[in-house]
Amino acid sequence: MPALDLTASSVDLTRAICDIPSVSDDETPLADAIEAAVSAYDHLEVIRDGDTIVARTSLGRSRRVVIAGHIDTVPINRNLPVEDREIDGQAFLWGRGTVDMKAGVAVQLKLAAELTDPAVDITWMWYDHEEVDSTLNGLGRLSRNRPDLFEGDFAILGEPSNGEVEGGCNGTLRALIRTDGVRAHSARSWIGENAIHKAAPILARLAEYRAREIEVEGLVYREGLNAVRISGGVAGNVIPDACEVEVNYRFAPSRDAEGAARVVRDVFTGFEVDIVDIAEGARPGLDAPLAKEFVDAVGATPTPKYGWTDVARFSALGIPAVNYGPGDPHLAHHDEERVPVAQIDAVERGLRAWLSAS
């Protein structure tokens, strides 16, 4: 099992963590390394649930902060091991996971080891299966198995935010829009009904859809409705009798799951719509006392999080939560995923200063 040295710099830890591949469903080696590393520190109580590792202080502070990060990545595509690169005079770590979100995890691990006497009690969570179906999410599983571990006054998720504070997040919904037809030999196509052709109005409605911008508690969230997959067809000489378009709807946190589903069904009136996955967003929650203190301490101007993140899980539990981590979210999952070294250091300084003084 590879060993992690938590006395190393956050930058060196980022390299080490990224170079332990942990594509979703294969997080165990990294989870083992994290568990072994944090277990060496007496000020931390360590709990494991599957491939999710929790480490927490119990110092009797009046307030507790939960700080979390996922350890899985999307598939590797010739972008490991990590490389050091310079772009326009700026140093970067280049490779899978550097942005989403192992640089954030590295900062958290270093601070978990070093902050033996923080101003607040801290629950650190490093969890599996964030990049796949929400039913597999390690943080969701942990909340069901050990809800007591989620007690807290404020939560920070280390998702990439360019070192800025991103409040709340959009919700996400996936739906399958289906059409039916009648099979026939393609040489006698008039005898059948082409289900793929019948999907043309679905694509037309998506092309005509205009993303809405919705203000929620002072932050403006941009919605989106897009086809992400289309399937159909039987053989090269057969008129297809079925077609399926998968649609992803990113919706503002002003909507709940029922309202989001209603929007999608209204857009595709007249078609069979099957909602297959939905996760509500999170309102910003920036009016909470600890959230205000945190934003002031790191000197940030909050912006909205357009993607879905696990801040929504904390929000659903009544815990205000924000996203704060190194890395440009536009490069998450990108084959040229890379994080500025200076940004890793800046996020470490911001978190360290606030946790030591809050």
Image (spheres, rainbow, N blue to C red):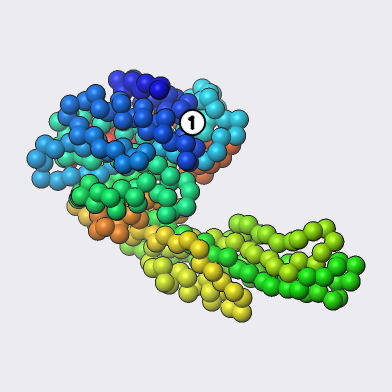
Amino acid type at circle 1 is Pro
The percent coordinates of residue 327 (x first, y second) are 45, 37
Q: Position of residue 348 (x, y in %)?
A: 32, 31
Mark 1, residues whose alpha carbon is within 10 Å: few (<14), some, or many (≥20)?
A: many
Which secondary structure lies at badge 1? loop
In which quadrant of the rendered view does residue 306 lie? Answer: bottom left
Residue 79, given in percent of the width and then of the height, sits at 57, 30
| x, y percent for residue 92 | 49, 27
Residue 201 visible in this rendered orientation of the protein: no
Give the side of residue 176 with respect to residue 39, left or right. right
Where does the N terminus fall, quadrant-wise? top left
Answer whether residue 78 is visible to the viewer in this image: yes
Label 1: which residue?
A: 21
Residue at 50% in and 72% down? 263
Q: Is residue 35 above or below residue 297?
A: above
Q: Nearer the viewer, residue 26 or 126?
A: 26
**Residue at figure coordinates x 33%, y 20% from the top left:** 5
Relative placement, left or right, of 268 versus 344 is right
Q: Residue furthest right?
A: 187
Quadrant (top left, top right, bottom left, bottom right) of the C terminus: top left
